[in-house]
Image (cartoon, rainbow, N blue to C red):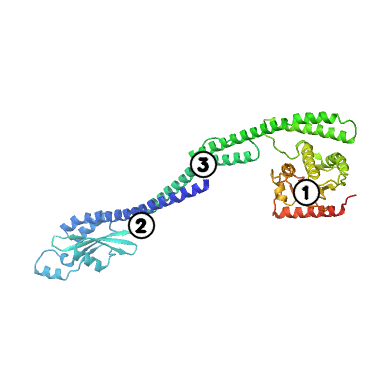
Amino acid sequence: MRWALVKVCVAVTTMVVVAFAVPLGLVIREMARDRAFSNAEREAAAIAPALSITTDRDQLERVVASAGSDAGMAVHIPASDSAGEGDSASEGAAADAQAVDIGRQRAADEDIATTRKLGRASTTEVPGGSTLLQPVALSSGEIAVVEVYVPESEVTNGVATAWAVLAGVGVALIVGSVAVADRLGVRMVQPAQRLVESAHELGEGKLGARVPEEGPTELRLAAVAFNSMADQVVQLLANERELAADLSHRLRTPLTVLRLNAASLGDGPAAEQTRAAVAQLEREVDTIIRTARDAKPQTAAIGVGGGCDAAEVVRERMDFWSALAEDEGRKVRVAGVDRPVRIPVARAELVAALDALLGNVFRHTAEGTAFAVDVHNGEDAVIVLVSDAGPGIADPEAAMARGRGSGSDGSTGLGLDIVRRLAESTGGDVRIGRSVLGGTEVRIWIQLDGREPVRRGHRGATVRRRRNTKLVSTFNRSRSLP
């Protein structure tokens, strides 16, 4: 916008300068020409009184010399006027006398004769300039012609300087218009840039981002609308946190009853597992309530708290779920957890993601269905595979969409969304496909370098994805259930 405004001002100012400067330059040239010929007319008029008195060559030469124009002035007197009054012998001599020409003649004889015949001044072009031919009536009734030479340098005297001044003024006007347009552009662009920056900050989760209400009227109104929208977003998020806290708090009563009932189960592995599950559920509910009540917006950060050991978390959670799997007759396989695998994900988030996936296996597959958890540590990513031998997922895209559970099986669609957000917080993603066991395979792609999320169709991402996919495929073919 800023440069567009500058270009418009440059174009408009240039057109205005050209529209005024070109005609003014032509007028200046004509004025210089008129001035030169006016001076020539004054010089010719200075000789007229002397010609009306005498036609004597010596006297006229002195008059021309006194005028200071002997180099550029010539006087042409008809031959009949060159003789004085006298007897008949003198008259005969006058008939044979020649015309009197004083000074250097530059005009053609035809032009001089035409001026004498017409009796009015005229100009004619000659080499190096122009001449003014001024007729003057003599006392004898004849017409003499005064020729004044006007060189080209005198005709154009001062024109180049005037044009240079006009050009300088035009350039100064254009530069001034650019400066003014730039300042106006800055006045409009800066509020727009602040609006864009605040929009980006709000999109990144910085709910305190606001736009100063300044600049042109339209941008001030946009800033007011943006700030109002940001306030509404903050209020909606606060309401959502309150609602989540209230809904979670309602779980305390049935959890208390469940804990009391679990305490009365007595001893045994199943009773211990039930009590442990109830205790963990209480802790999760408490965490949800505290997080929802927190007034500060929660934002995911890569590597917060130094991450965690994915192998350790998988071993711990599989120990918990293996007991339940044994009760239901499920075969379980765990691979890739024999050595530490550091990932930039908080431990609690990875635990929640694994529990969501493994809980889906138990919830949506029949008893006796085998499942496996594999961890693969690549060069720039860690891949966690959760696969089962169940019927699979008919529509993976719908399963990945938040809140699109079918409802018939009690699914809300939030479990896979938790897994997706965990992967995308590191720049990775989640894929659902067919496992080597014949059922569903959920592949969690966790980036280790904190880069931007991998976009589909990007050439470099495709190469990196193909390399890791090849390794994972080899890893999948080599694994089998005990």
In the figure, residue 227 lies in which quadrant?
top right
Is residue 297 shown to the viewer in this render?
Answer: yes
Q: Which residue is mark 3?
A: 188
In this image, 241 relative to 388: left or right? left
At 52% from the left edge and 46% from the top edge, which residue is drawn?
Answer: 1
Q: Where residue 447 sits in the image (x, y, percent)?
A: 76, 46
Select label 3 or label 1 by which is in front.
Answer: 1
User: Which amino acid lies under the numbered mark 1 shown in the image of this protein?
Assistant: Arg
User: Which amino acid lies under the numbered mark 2 shown in the image of this protein?
Assistant: Ser
Residue that sits furthest to the left in the current view = 87
- Residue nearest the viewer, comparing 444 with 249: 249
Q: CA distance from mark 2 to mark 3?
A: 53 Å
Image position of 381 with respect to 89: above or below: above
- Residue nearest the viewer, comparing 74 with 9: 9
At 28% from the left edge and 56% from the top edge, which residue is drawn?
Answer: 37
State which tag comes first along the sequence, 2 or 3. Answer: 2
- Residue nearest the viewer, comparing 350 with 381: 350
Q: Which mark is residue 170?
A: none
Q: CA distance from mark 3 to mark 1?
A: 49 Å
Q: CA distance from mark 1 to mark 2?
A: 91 Å
At 74% from the left edge and 31% from the top edge, which residue is drawn?
Answer: 251
| Secondary element at image label 2 | helix
In this image, 466 relative to 68: left or right? right
In the figure, residue 419 lies in which quadrant?
top right
- Crowding around mark 3 (Cα neighbors within 10 Å: few <14, some 14 to 19, many 20+) is some
In the figure, residue 450 lies in which quadrant?
top right
Q: Where residue 149 sits in the image (x, y, percent)?
A: 29, 60
| Secondary element at image label 1 | strand
- Residue nearest the viewer, comparing 118 with 55: 118
Is residue 158 shown to the viewer in this render?
Answer: no
Q: Which residue is mark 2?
A: 153
Q: Which residue is mark 1?
A: 443
